[in-house]
Amino acid sequence: MMTKKTALVAACCRSNGIGKNGTLPWRLKSEMDFFTRITSTVLDSAPGLAGDEQVKKNAVIMGVRTYMSIPPSFRPLKHRVNVVLSRTITEAPAGVDFLFRSFDEAIKTLSEMSNIDQLYVIGGSEVYKESIARPDCDLIFLTKIDADFDCDRFFPPIDHDQYEDITDEKLLPKYRHIIDKYDIPLDVQTENGLSFRYHLYKRK
Ligand SMILES: NC(=O)c1ccc[n+]([C@@H]2O[C@H](COP(=O)([O-])OP(=O)(O)OC[C@H]3O[C@@H](n4cnc5c(N)ncnc54)[C@H](OP(=O)(O)O)[C@@H]3O)[C@@H](O)[C@H]2O)c1
């Protein structure tokens, strides 16, 4: 059985910060909409089907603290299979579809499920750190916010020997098909007086 590839999805500020006091340091609705679209869109589905009618769903894999950081009215994340990692809790929090004690266990089980399409790793810091170093991590969707925020959680450094930014002007011609597949806006975005840009890194 082949295990599935994973994709990370994150937003960070200049210091690579991703969180503070168990929550997001910023509020960017359009960035949140981008996250929802990327993680919810099933690429391998019958055309014309949306939401709960889809035969397949993507899975979102997250640490238990990230799940609990989602406002209760927004969790579980709809139209996606919600997967939580924890070594201590024994019962899945309300709304969670699967609870796993390790990344290996999660990837192995989810890879065997034919009704699951993409596996998206959505944080937090510890989970990103482990997954970025795994050979099954193929893509990193990283929104870079051009501002400084006080943070206590950080995105791990990206090893440029392993990953390349395919939204970089020089690489774009070669990887246009991937950018188009995910419909990633490449121009600088602005909201709430903040500038940010969507980047996509791919394993070389
Ligand atoms: N900006 C962004 O894109 C973004 C995205 C997500 C989250 N965040 C922010 O990040 C913060 C939350 O993240 P966090 O780093 O504090 O925590 P987290 O990574 O969400 O959760 C950490 C917990 O997950 C469990 N865990 C992690 N790796 C595991 C593994 N390999 N196997 C089994 N269990 C594992 C452990 O739970 P146990 O201790 O129970 O074993 C660990 O204590 C919040 O501030 C949130 O807003 C930001």
Image (cartoon, helix red, strand yellow):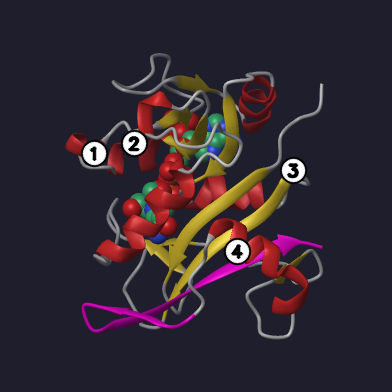
Which residue is tagged 4? 180
The answer to whether residue 160 is left or right of residue 200 is right
First of labels 1, 4 by sequence position:
1
Q: Where does ligand 1 appear, by image quarter?
A: top left
Q: Nearer the viewer, mark 1 or mark 4?
A: 4
Q: Secondary structure at mark 2?
A: loop
Give the alpha-carbon distance from disc 4 to disc 3, as whole Å. Answer: 22 Å
Could you say whether the residue bearing mark 1 is in a helix, strand or loop? helix
Q: CA distance from mark 3 to mark 1?
A: 29 Å
**Is disc 4 placed on a helix, strand or loop?**
helix
Q: Which residue is mark 2?
A: 77
Residue range highlighted in magenta: 187-204
In magenta stretch: residue 200:
yes
Dominant secondary structure of the magenta stretch? strand
Three-letter amino acid code at the position of disc 3: Asp
Residue, x 66% and y 65% (percent of image)? 201
Q: Which residue is mark 3?
A: 136
Return the residue at label 1. 74
